[in-house]
Amino acid sequence: MTLTTVRHLGVVLSCLLVAPISGAQPDERRPMPTPSPPQNALSAVMMRMLLQRTDVQRELELSDEQNNALKAIFKAGVGDWQNAAQYTMQPPPNRPAPRNPDSLVEKRRAAVLEVEQQYARQIEAILLPHQLRRLKQIYRQFRVGGMLFLTFMGSEVDEDLGISPEQRKVLEARAKELRQELQEKIRQANQAATEEMMQLLTPDQRQRFTELVGETFQFEQAIGR
């Protein structure tokens, strides 16, 4: 698929999203399978986000020619990317499922995901094999905030590492414990740092600051997933 074809995808997708489906008789309709990226997969949306970071570009040692080609793809259809992002991010656990694959919404979703997958193939064609491999490594680190032990809370690496079901239970349980321990250490370090900064203020400033921020609020799942 040429870059010109990529640019035309936005126009085609817009037509799919706004045009009513007509001319089909009830007995002619067939369920349309909805492509879904595998959980934890490096989608084109995530590729785009990472490849736009200068630190990732330096790590991959992208050439000027590669950067220019990537920028052209990213500019090809902003609306397409927004739609792809909406439907390829991990859905919340309380989202109703399954949805009717024969509905107009599902057909639109399938069209958007197909565009997203085409973009992914375009990006992969620009990167060299070792660059794509490194990008996937960086993504695995990025999605857990650099805290690699959180990787073991899911089954993403089970097949590659040959992790048994028994190991899975032990690893997941211990990873949860470590996350809680780390959260507590961070909370204590944050409290100590705040108290130290407060000592640099006058009594009146400390009182005004307390009024500005209020009582400490404990955010749930502040670390990892």
Image (tube, grey):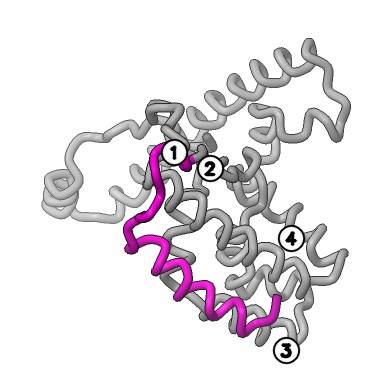
Q: Please state which amino acid type lies under the numbered disc 1.
A: Asp
Label 3: how many Cα within 10 Å (few below 14, some 14–19, many 20+): few
Return the residue nearer the eye: 141 or 215. Answer: 141
- Residue pictured at 43% horizontal, 53% vertical: 108
Please state which of residues 181 and 173 is positioned toward the viewer in this rendering.
173
- The answer to whether 123 appears left or right of 116 in the picture is right
C-alpha distance separating marks 4 and 1: 36 Å
The span shown in magenta is 1-29
Mark 3 belongs to which amino acid? Asp
The 10 Å Cα crowd at callout 4, few under 14, some 14 to 19, many 20 or more, is: many
User: As rendered, which of 70 and 202 lies closer to the eye?
Assistant: 70
> Is the residue under label 2 in contact with that under label 1 (CB below 8 Å)?
yes
Residue 189 appears in the picture as rendered: no
Amino acid identity at mark 2: Met
Using a 10 Å C-alpha cutoff, classify the residue at mark 1 as few (fewer than 14 neighbours), some (14 to 19) or many (20 or more). some
SS category of the residue bearing label 4? helix
Majority secondary structure in the magenta region:
helix
Comparing marks 3 and 1, which lies closer to the viewer? 1
Q: Which residue is mark 2?
A: 32
Q: CA distance from mark 3 to mark 1?
A: 45 Å
Q: If you read the primary sequence from the N terminus, does the residue marked by circle 3 or circle 1 appear first? A: 3
On the image, numbered disc 4 is attached to which residue? Answer: 135
